[in-house]
Image (tube, grey):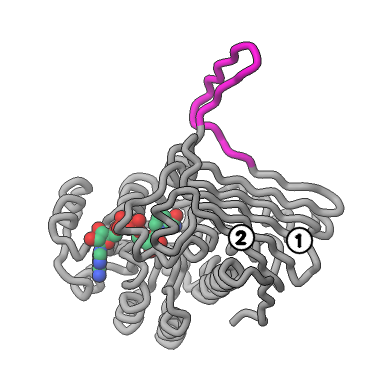
Amino acid sequence: MTVGIGLAGLGRIGRVHARNLRGRCAEAHLACVYDADTAAAQEVAAAFEVPWVATFAELLDRCAAVAIASPTATHAPLTIEAAAAGVPVFCEKPLSLDRDAALAAVEACEQAGVALQVGFHRRFDPDWVAAAERIAAGELGQVQLFRTSLRDMDPPNPAFLAHSGGFFADVTVHDLDVARWLCGEVAEVSAHGAAADPAFAANDDIDTAVVVLRFASGALGVIDNSRSARYGYECSTEVMGTLATARIDNPHPRGLEWRTPGAATRGFARDFEERYPFAYAAELDAFARCVRDGSPPRVTGRDAIAASDLATAATESWRSGRTVSLEVPV
Ligand SMILES: NC(=O)c1ccc[n+]([C@@H]2O[C@H](COP(=O)([O-])OP(=O)(O)OC[C@H]3O[C@@H](n4cnc5c(N)ncnc54)[C@H](O)[C@@H]3O)[C@@H](O)[C@H]2O)c1
């Protein structure tokens, strides 16, 4: 019996989740959809042949668990409403741009005894999972260096950017979560940012960043991020240890490589959905298992707050030009 998920928010990532729940997930199915924009709800309901509802409260009535993929500012209030109704929550990242609101959402779920899983999909990609298991088993020895890149091909639309929370909270937060997951807590953050596109500078934001981490273990890390790499969507990670090095490179969506003297071409993924054909489905399957058997989610609300704290530290470092030291996370 698969778990019926109600999906709230049917934009870019919401439709990725709808496609996975409809076609790829083995343990969860799309039970019902809701969007503040009724036309979007009707369109997705027709396309996926599922019912739609006009309010979040109705959605909660019609599902065993809910997936929240609406804009960031709505995550905490919708999570709290779901918790009050006793409905387990999968919520897109970040939980909130306001730390107190994020904590209130986490505590509401803890007090109601409902699962809360946050959408850091890379924790469910088979390559990252295999690397994480071997690192945790000690096969890499002592971690010395962490390196990761996340570069979008094109920036999202300006309406999204206005409410994104800024580059570090929206983009780098994925890498900060992976850093904690693979290498443990971060003690220091130093961040540099630049706006190659003046539209970002005009919004007091950036589109390119390098973040240097010092882990509590003494290991070092470096993250590079871009909003507009142009050539494609790129995401790769490397962890170097005393016994081994794990490197997760970019799979190429097409096998054809055209080689001419001095040059060879290979395609890159265009976006996050193409880069992660398994991870987005696997995170919802894992959430469904938590709903069914009551086991704790692999990536919790407190993990999300810890990653956001690091993003806040990176923003502070970028603005002040100083290294920021961190307290022990929540
Ligand atoms: N994990 C990932 O890889 C990933 C990728 C993209 C976006 N995200 C996150 O997902 C969230 C949504 O991003 P997006 O790019 O899909 O945004 P989007 O603007 O494309 O879509 C948002 C949708 O939510 C709807 N909406 C607005 N208010 C609502 C409400 N109160 N209740 C229900 N629906 C509402 C809008 O009408 C729209 O259809 C953001 O928090 C973003 O950070 C995560």
- What's the residue at 86%, 54% (across, down)? 242
- Residue 69: x percent and y percent? 34, 62
Nearer the camera: disc 1 or disc 2: 2
Q: Is residue 91 above or below residue 171?
A: below
> What quarter of the picture does the C terminus occupy?
bottom right
Is 262 one of the magenta-colored residues? yes
Find the magenta span and give its range: 249-267
- Residue 150: x percent and y percent? 55, 49
Q: Which residue is mark 2?
A: 192
Residue 31 visible in this rendered orientation of the protein: no
Compared across the picture, whether 219 is left or right of 147 comes to: right
Hey, what amino acid is under mark 1?
Leu
- What's the residue at 70%, 67% (across, down)? 184
Residue 54 visible in this rendered orientation of the protein: yes
Q: Which residue is mark 1?
A: 220
- What's the residue at 56%, 52% (across, down)? 225
Compared across the picture, whether 28 is left or right of 191 comes to: left
Number of disc labels: 2
Please name the predominant secondary structure of the magenta segment in the image.
loop
Hey, what amino acid is under mark 2?
His
Q: First in sequence: mark 1 or mark 2?
A: 2
